[in-house]
Amino acid sequence: MPVAELEQKLAIIRGAIECETCSQSHTVRVGMGQEESQEHRFPCCQCKEDIVIHLDVDYKNVIAHIRCGSNCRQTDEVAGAPVVNLDANFLIGEADQGKDRVFPRLRQMREIIERVIEERGPEALEDSRKLSAAQLNSRPYRRPDYADEWKRLKKAWSLARNDKDKLSRQIIDSAHVAFYSADDPLDGLPDWLWRFSMFASQPAYEQKFRDAMDAIRNIDQSRLRDLGVRYEGELARPRADLYFAAFNEFFGGYGEHAQVFFSVARGDAMAPDRKATSHGFESVRMSYGNLFEGFTSLIELPVLLNNIQQGRDHGQFAQLTLENYRRLDKASRCNPLSSTPALFALCEEADNQLRNASHHGGIRFEPGGQTISYRAGKGEPATNSRWGMLNISRDAPVCFCKY
């Protein structure tokens, strides 16, 4: 098969650009992602100044084109120009970067298929030819364009928070038509949030949450009444604000996160020689710290449920009162769950050292090696060394974190 035809089949869009700073030509090969517009940031091969390009996709007509963002202009392809391989949703091995006629996403697609067959059998693979057009345009068969869906969900959520329920409902109804099956309509904002979160976190996080629910399944219902009163009167609104902020934080840097997001959601191991190709680290520099702050406040509800599960009132801990618990520093908020492994597992990616580095200027990005380093300090590290966008190997006192 000719290379150009293979590139087209694998949704690799080829283009040529020139750096506006030093006039260096580049051939770019961009692996198409799931969103209608995808941003890529990389250093010029000559002067090292950042270049930003966008891949705009028309999924209805199945066409895509490269658009210059900053520090570049489109030009004709120059023979021998440096090749820059980019991808919205796959990592690229160091040995493949800078090479033409390589297809790292093809190898990774094959790995995904082989793993699905090994774990779930060949029947787990759906033949898209047997699906109707309506099915192909609806979750779970629709392409996972979560950033585009989030834009609508965010607006509906924002309107609801401002008591504009009628306008919010209009967006929900429109989103149902765009993203979900006509046979299973969205019945409101909570339903949409639940479905969105469920699809976006599958399959790696499903078992963790099933285990957590099983841990509290037989909870003493008579003790839930007081917690329900507290929740409605004291906790509901601030928790909703924290969830909104968390979603907003994550999708604010989604162009960077998406390079590994689908691998993490599948539970894939990160090969150390594969790296993210977009270098927009500044847009996510403080994301982990911001999410950590929100998470360690939101974990309070599982902690209160755990108190009931252990036979106490929701606000009574083994050695603390609720007031004393709330005075704990954020790094200690998960500790009361340590006696209930299924609930404590919700905290396995919470790392106070990385949070401190994120918030106190202790984190550094080295674009030459695509390496993030941070100085370890106060707090215990997470037991799981994968934090969504980061794959971290430890070498105290400095931890080197590769995309």
Image (tube, rainbow, N blue to C red):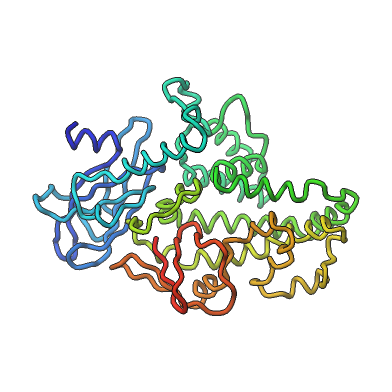
Relative side of 74 to 359, left or right = left
Q: Can you say whether 13 is above or below 254 in the image?
A: above
Residue sitting at 47 percent across and 29 percent down? 122
Q: In the rendering, at what x and y percent does residue 337 appear?
A: 72, 62
Relative side of 124 to 16, left or right = right
Q: Quadrant of the C terminus?
A: bottom left
Q: Residue furthest left?
A: 79
Q: In the rendering, at what x and y percent does residue 141 appear?
A: 49, 31
Q: In the rendering, at what x and y percent does residue 267 appear?
A: 50, 49
Residue 63 occupies which quadrant of the picture?
top left
User: 118 and 225: which one is in front?
Assistant: 118
User: 363 and 127: which one is in front?
Assistant: 127
Residue sitting at 85 percent across and 66 percent down? 316
Q: In the rendering, at what x and y percent does residue 312 appear?
A: 87, 61
Relative side of 349 to 217, left or right = left
Residue 229 occupies which quadrant of the picture?
bottom right
Q: Quadrant of the N terminus?
A: top left
Number of disc labels: 0
Residue sitting at 65 percent across and 48 percent down? 209
User: 338 and 128: which one is in front?
Assistant: 338
Relative side of 216 to 197, left or right = right
Q: Can you say whether 276 is above or below 203 in the image?
A: below
Q: Residue furthest front?
A: 118
